[in-house]
Image: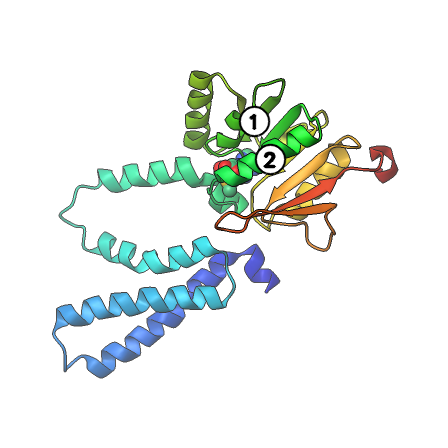
Amino acid sequence: MKLLRSYPIIGAIAAQIVAGALVFALVLGAADRFDARILFWSALLVQSVVAALVTKLLGLPVWWIWIGLCFPAAMALALYAGDLPAWPFGLGFVVLYLLFSNTARERVPLYLTNRATTEALASLMQQRNARRFIDLGSGFGGVVRALDGEGRQATGVETAPLVWLVSAILSKIQRRGRMLRQDIWTTDISDQDVVYVFLSPEPMPALYDKARREMKPGSLLVSNSFGVPGLKPSEIWELSDRRKTRLYLYEMSEPRAAEE
Ligand SMILES: C[S@@+](CC[C@H](N)C(=O)[O-])C[C@H]1O[C@@H](n2cnc3c(N)ncnc32)[C@H](O)[C@@H]1O
C-alpha cells in the first residue's frame, strides 16, 4: 500500500475502473428492461457510490472518497454540456486551483482549526509564557489572528494563492497577525516558541525532521490530529469538542547540535 500512499491517483483510477465494470455488467443485464433515462441515472449513481466505497476500502484519504463520488457526475456534465458556455467551467477550475493547489501537490487539504482548538492553543501559549507562534500552512489565518496580540507575535505561512490573499486581507483589516505567502519547507522556524501544524499524515516525518534541525531547545511543535509516525509525543491534549481533537505536543528538549 506504499504505492497508494505515494500515488493515490492510482487507487482513484482503480476505483473508477472497478465501479465501471460493475455498471457495465448491470447495464448489459438490464438494457432491454428499462427506459434509457432510468438506466443512465442508475448507472451514474452506482458508478459514484461504488467508486467511493472502493476508494474507502483502499484506505485513501477522505478527499479522494469525495473525488470518487463526484467524478462520474462531473464527467457526465462535461459530456452533456455541449450547449452550456465554457467559461463557468474554466472559471471554476481556476478558483479551485487557487483554493486547493496544495491538496494535489502536498496532499494537504483545506480544513480549518475550530474554536475549541484555538482556545486550547491560546491557553498553551499562556501556560508556557510563549511569545512567538507560527502556523505552518495557515489557511485563512483564523488561528494566527486569534493568537496575535497581548505581547504575542503570531505568523502564518500559506502558499495557496486565494487562501493566502483572503488571510492577508483579513489580517490587515483586523491588524492582527502576519501572513506570509511562503512555503512551509523554506520557512525559518528557529526563533519560534510554538510551531503549529494542521496538515495530513503525509508530511509529518519530514516536518519533524525540519523541527529537530531548526527549532530551539524548549520550543514546542504542536500537530493537530496527525502524530509523527513511530514517535511518542511529549504530551497529547485531548479536547472535548465534537470531533474529539487531539493535539500532539513535541518538545524540542535536546540541543540541536547533538542531532547534527
Ligand atoms: C488543513 S489546512 C489548515 C489551515 C490552518 N492551519 C488552520 O488550522 O485553520 C492546511 C493548509 O496548509 C496549506 N499548505 C499545504 N502545504 C503547504 C506548503 N508547502 N506551504 C504552505 N502552505 C501549505 C494548505 O494550502 C492549507 O491551507
Q: Which of the image's four quarters has the C terminus?
A: top right
61 to 124, vertically: above or below:
below
Kindly identify which numbered label has been placed on residue 259. none
Q: Amino acid at mark 1?
A: Leu
Q: Which mark is residue 147?
A: 1
Q: Secondary structure at mark 2?
A: helix
Describe residue 191's horizontal placement relative to residue 107 as left or right. right
Disc 2 marks a residue whose amino acid type is Leu
Q: Nearer the viewer, residue 224 or 72?
A: 224
Specify the quadrant of the image occupied by residue 77: bottom left
- Identity of the residue drawn at 74% across and 32% down: 219
Instruction: Place residue 37 in its image quadrant.
Output: bottom left
Question: Dot 2, how many residues are within 10 Å of its Cα: few (below 14), some (14-19), or many (20+)?
Answer: many
Q: Nearer the viewer, residue 43 or 61?
A: 61
What x and y, as percent, mark residue 106?
54, 44
Look at the image and tell me in which quarter the N terminus lies: bottom right
Estimate how packed mark 1 is, as few (under 14), some (14 to 19) or many (20 or more) residues with alpha carbons within 10 Å: many
**Left or right: 203 as drawn, with respect to 77:** right
Which label sits on residue 121? Answer: 2
Q: Residue at x 52, y 31 (%)?
A: 143
- Look at the numbered discs 1 and 2 and tell me whether their residues touch, using CB distance below 8 Å: yes
How is colour applied across the structure in the image?
A: rainbow
